[in-house]
Image (tube, helix red, strand yellow):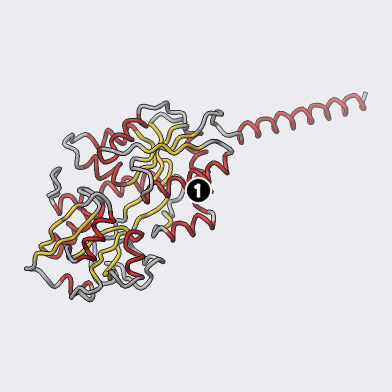
Amino acid sequence: MKRLIVAAMSCFALLACKVADAQAQIALAPPLSERPLTLVVPFAAGGGTDILARLIGDRLRALTSKTVVIDNKPGANGLVASQFVEKSRPDGHTLMFGSNSTHVIAPLLSTDKNAMDAVRQKFVLISIIARTPLVLAVNENSKFRDLDQFLAQPNAELTFGTFGVHSSPHLMGALLAAQRGLRLVHVPYRGSSPAVTDLIGGTLDSVFLTVAAVSSYVEAKQLRALAVTGTQRVSLIPDVPTFQEVGVGGLENDGWFAVFAPAGTPENVVVYLRSKLVEVMAEPGMQAKLQELGLQDAGVMSGKETDSWDKSVALTQDILRKTRIDMDGR
């Protein structure tokens, strides 16, 4: 009888282990179907945003063994891509590679006063994956040898080129002008390259662009970088101080890239995708690529994504109040 009881107990223990193991396997199983994962990019192929999105797509493909499709949907400052993703099935298979431009600046400058609240209701932030420091640069032959000399021109009308109206550099340039009483005239371009070309050619006084857009020209001694936004120097141009270092506060609010899912995406799917993105961005190879692109690790801990989005909205609202930039870009 004793032997029967022991045998029975052993069977129950073995069964319990198998059940627990099966439950663990279910819990660890990816909460996605066999369908491809689509990462929608709100800009044309070939630009810096597209390059980063494709790098991340490649690494996600390797980590998840899923097909990852990069779908470029440029237009209307990200609105075309946003509307496509927000209307897609909220199952984690269609994601948006957004930024503070698409999910903070654009809705805050919309004529619809409820646009920001609407964006928050239509999307869930999976993870901020990289920060995008901006740099103020002048021609190497410019009379402005450093930022102090540039700022010591309260009565001079100086131009600064960016890659577009209502872009992050547009806001940073307008904020710098408002804080220092400068007469900075914004000159928007369709991309960074034509702005750099005009700066080198002497048509512009300065540019406010991403580090990646100007670093090679700085290295070639064609442009001189005066300062970068953010709270730390950029490894691609390590000798260039932050605005904060030289006594100019308020320009610590870097731009950022992030991955969004449609609202209503199940929490377990969000957690799964977030964990995979954390793995991707932690890879030494990806960290090296960020440096090559003039980007910085976002350093956002899991669970703090919403707080970071809230902070970015608050900082941008403050900038818009100080600069009084409107929908016409003035």
Q: Amino acid at mark 1?
A: Val
| Residue located 65% across and 30% down the image | 23
**Residue at 39% in and 42% down:** 97
- Name the residue: 70% across, 33% down: 21
Q: Is residue 227 above or below residue 286?
A: below
Image-based side of 193 in relation to 125, left or right? left
Which one is nearer the viewer's eye here, 164 or 155?
164
Q: Residue 263 at x, y = what percent?
A: 38, 31
Residue 315 appears in view: no
> In the displayed image of the protein, which residue is found farthest to the front?
201
Mark 1 sits on what residue? 278
- In the rendered structure, the answer to whether residue 263 lies left or right of residue 91 reads left
**Residue 319: image location, x then y, percent:** 20, 53
Residue 72 in which image quadrant: top left
Where the N terminus falls, by quadrant? top right
In screen coordinates, is 258 left or right of 206? right
Quadrant of res 234: bottom left
Name the element at disc 1: helix
Which percent across, then down, holds residue 288? 49, 60
Q: Nearer the viewer, residue 47 or 182?
A: 47
Count of all numbered marks drawn on residues in the image: 1
